Image (cartoon, rainbow, N blue to C red):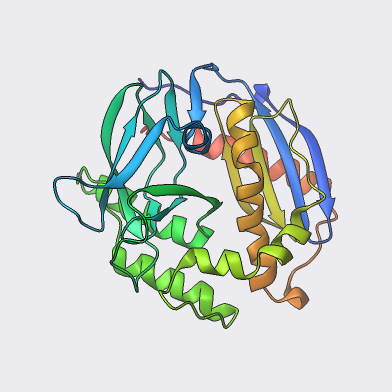
Amino acid sequence: MKTKLFELEETEIIDVQNDNLITVAQLRCRSNELENIISIHKAFEDNLIIISENSEMEEVGQIELENLSNSYVFILDGDILKGAKQNRVINTSVLVAPKSKIILPVSCVEKGRWSYRSRNFSPSDEVAHRSIRYSKTNFINSNKKANISSFEANQSDVWKQVANVNHCVEFVSDTESHSDLFNEYKDELKDLTKEFKCSDMANGIAIFIGDHLYSCEIFNNNNLLKDYFMKLLKTSAMDVKLGSHDQIRKLDNQKLIYDTINNIVGEFNKSTDLP
């Protein structure tokens, strides 16, 4: 079905919060909301999913998820799953049907481990850094343009991006784990994001570091946004840690926020290929 998912005239900024170098604009976009969608985090908390290595063939790029619930389970591109033989990142956003079992396309974000730490995976409290998400999405989209129907990412490039982020802060992980970086700086990231609150009216978020847009996500409903709000904010806040403060200009122009988000919606709707 080819249609516009977001109408510019029905997209509004309902809240703008700022603390130091971080600005968060929360959006409300017209959406056909479905009540029976829950996040992977909510499903895991309620023991409604089982995530494990592929039972037929254990390999880096595929893991198995069984949805035991009567709800659709939403998983965001960039969600990190920890445990099993090595931590993985989801390659593309997925909606898992109720009472179903699927193979998830993933990439490794823990290069130095291939041994069981736990029998199953668990969702983490972070979303992969934007450079990792971009690497995966760019590779998948390039394959799509070449008529290659695959959600496989370039594993070597994903490892490269994990290493680059660690290198920027001179951090070393024994297993080259992306999650270890967030754990190392969890107190600092918590301090950077503690003043921000998720609106009960929003279903989208745009995060600026200085005067540059670093993240924009629009969800089906407010509950999904609430589940991902702090995870996305924490990941974007990592760029405050990674960046040079002398080169980051504080955002002082509200018009920039409105113009940027208007352009995002406009550019998105130019696409005729919906996921």
Question: Quadrant location of residue 216?
Answer: top right
Residue 235 vs 216, above or below: the answer is below
Q: Is residue 165 visible?
A: yes
Where is the N terminus found, in terms of image quarters? top left
Q: Is residue 15 left or right of residue 115?
A: right
Q: Is residue 157 left or right of residue 214?
A: left
The residue at 68%/60% (across/down) is 237
> Where residue 116 sits in the image (x, y, percent)?
31, 61
Residue 147 place in picture, x, y as percent = 20, 44
Residue located 44% across and 78% down the image: 174
- Across and down, in percent, residue 264 comes to 59, 41
Q: How many marks?
A: 0
Residue 211 seen anywhere in this rendered image of the structure: no
For residue 64, what is the image quadrant? top left
| 127 relative to 237 in the view: left or right | left
- Classify residue 197 as left or right of residue 140: right
Q: Residue at position x 44%, y 46% from top? A: 77
Q: Is residue 45 above or below residue 20?
A: above
Say if 268 sits above or below 86 in the image.
Answer: above
Q: Quadrant of the C terminus?
A: top left
